[in-house]
Amino acid sequence: HYGGVIFDLDGVIADTARFHYEAWKKLAYELGIYFDKKTNERLKGIGRMESLDIILENSNISYTLEQKKYYAEKKNEYYKQFIQTLTPDDVLPGVKELMEILKRKGIKTAVASASKNAPTVLNKLGIASEFDYIVDASRIRKGKPDPELFLTAAINIGVEPSECIGIEDSAAGIEAIKRAGMFAVGVGDPKILKKADMVLKDLKDYGKIVDIISENI
Ligand code: B16
Ligand code: MG
């Protein structure tokens, strides 16, 4: 039986994945580095510095650690400007409906985001207090695809990993959920989220998650 649902943030609760993309695109353009949606797909769920390293694979210049820190910070400044525009209307369709049903069923909820901006985003969306636990990405040693973020969420909501469902929009995140021993729900393209146990186009289809919970009492 399932006792916990752990949500990714960017690309699941809100469409902030598009802001990360725009911010990286702006930086790559300034650096004269080729950047496209295919490279961007590899950045989803991956930490800031690692994302920069992936972008710099397309550069023939080698950057010092100091320079890399500077550019990662620059991208973050762009991202922070984008998220200032967020309002409670930006919570993606289906999220609030699903949260309400989970609460009624006594199922615990958590957010496992790799983003250090997660608290700001959740506050802007006005839903920070709806979750039983929000993992602090700055305290995590290993990012996705390592299971640490999801396992930390499970421990803090007091639910066995095997009794948790994780929801993710990134391939790295789905891998993290599976390595944590949880049921993985992908949101997006099934060709990208191959390792998921179930893939939904978006969370408007939240009924399918409720079904999984109801079928396993
Ligand atoms: P920040 P998630 C991830 O959030 C994003 O998918 C990824 O693109 C981003 O690089 C990462 O957070 C770190 O974010 O630079 O704000 O600390 O999808 O795990 O909610
Ligand atoms: Mg995501």
Image (tube, rainbow, N blue to C red):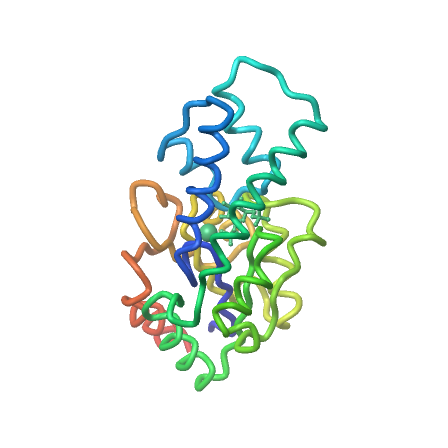
Residue drawn at point x = 57 percent, y = 51 percent: 114
Give x and y (percent) for residue 50. 59, 35
Location of residue 217 (image quadrant): bottom left
Residue 41: quadrant of the picture: top left
Q: Position of residue 20 (x, y in %)?
A: 47, 45
Q: Residue at x 58, y 63 (%)?
A: 120
Q: Nearer the viewer, residue 5 or 85?
A: 85
Residue at 61%, 33% in the rendered image: 71
- How many labels sit on residues? 0
Closer to us: 32 or 102: 32
- In front of the other: 206 or 154: 206
- Residue 135, image x, y percentages: 63, 61
Above or below residue 163? Residue 74 is above
Q: Is residue 138 left or right of residue 26?
A: right
Towards the viewer: 53 or 64 = 64
- Residue at x 69% of width, y 52% of height: 138
Relative height, residue 29 to residue 217 (above, below): above
- Residue furthest toward the bottom? 104
The outermost residue toward the top is 60
Left or right relative to 167: residue 192: left
> In the displayed structure, would residue 57 be above or below residue 207?
above
> Can you give x and y, in whole percent of width and height, for residue 27 in the image?
50, 33
